[in-house]
Amino acid sequence: MAGVYIHIPFCHKACTYCDFHFSVSLKNKAALVDALLKEIELRKSFLDEPVSTIYFGGGTPSVLNADEINRITEKVAEHFQLALTEVTLEANPEDLTPAFLQSLRKTVVNRLSIGIQSFNNERLQWMNRSHTAEQACNAVQRAKDEGFDISIDLIFALPGMTLHEWEEQLLKASSLQVPHISAYSLTLESKTAYAHQVKNKKVQELNDSDAEAQFLAAHDFFSAKGYHHYEISNYAISGKEAKHNSSYWLQAPYLGLGPSAHSFKRQLRCWNVANNNSYIKSVEQGILPLTCEELQTKDTFNETVMTALRTAVGLNIKTLEKKTPHEMFQQFLKDVSLQKQKGWIEQKGDVVFIPLVHWYKADSVISEFFITH
């Protein structure tokens, strides 16, 4: 089964920490939607299996109205075989008014990923978010009342954040009783307001040991509440894991639509131009504004290892062996043996995995297995 990702590159404001592609001007929104419809037609041959998930990401997809969402999903249905189990819309709390939620019930959207980020109003102001903690809680309750599956996003390792402050955030999140929670460590990305503040010494990054302590605290807290920590940044009640995002980690094919969106199938990776005007003009002319590359064997190997070791399921050695050249696989086994001796990797049967105590350092651990030549 395949997925479709739709990038909506508009936001009302620029968040302090965000480096995703977006514009704070919505003047081209109608033209962008028209271009998306055209791109769907132009790329109708990309997927050759049924689409089970659709994900509206961004940016802020909740700037779309129900009619625009329906036009997009109906065009997807026109050109692809659908077997939908999950259709997610990322949303900001301030957009989830009673009227908007009721209109969403007339679309195929059945899941909302709500960008709360913090329940502390001072932190929200620093992030340049448009909502308050009260608005976030009210939005979640309204969405639950309307029958949507809910996921919420939180950010830890904020400048100066203490473990006590983070624990208060966890308690508030738990009180909302949502089935899925994503908790992300704040990262310093260049060309963001946060990076500018750090450079000018207006704020200081939280040190790694405190950030890791907050990561482990979230694991302990949510695990005790019955959540399954199924991927480094994601927790879910059993059966409520994000199907679309899980497909990425399983390397299922997906089509990415909209400026900056990425697509993947088998040995092919493609990405669209990250410029709204260029994207719109190109698609209007019937030209796909994308770049593609054939993945080399080492690229496929690296991505397989990276995605699997980020999950609680881990990496099945027998499955990897079937699609890996002998010499490359033998080197992998040597690397596994070395990392097991160091305590960074554990093994049960045919499965290797990063023990939870080292999950916060997963990127560093995984990089030890990468083939670079």
Image: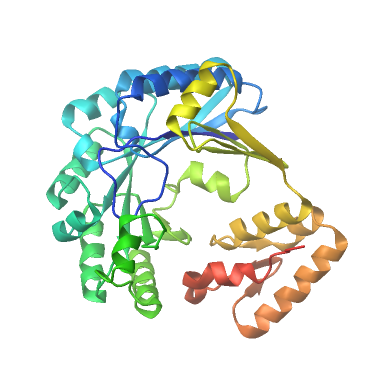
Q: Nearer the viewer, residue 345 or 290?
A: 290
Residue 250 relative to residue 322: left or right: left
Where's residue 133, x and y in %?
16, 52
Residue furthest to the front in view is 200
Q: Residue at x 66, y 80 (%)?
A: 340
Residue 303 relative to residue 280: left or right: right
Residue 296 visible in the current orientation: yes
Where's residue 59, x and y in %?
36, 39
Query: Which color scheme is applied?
Result: rainbow
Residue furthest to the right in view is 326
Where's residue 121, x and y in %?
14, 56
213, above or below 293, in the image: below
State how many labels appear. 0
Q: Quadrant of residue 65?
A: top left
* Quadrant containing the C terminus in the rendered view: bottom right
280, above or below 91, in the image: above
Q: Nearer the viewer, residue 207 or 229?
A: 207
Q: Quadrant of residue 9?
A: top left
Residue 343 relative to residue 193: left or right: right
Q: Residue at x 86, y 65 (%)?
A: 327
Residue furthest to the bottom in view is 341
Q: Quadrant of residue 135?
A: top left
* Quadrant containing the N terminus in the rendered view: top right
Residue 353 visible in the current orientation: no
Q: Residue at x 22, y 42 (%)?
A: 93
Where's residue 101, x and y in %?
24, 29
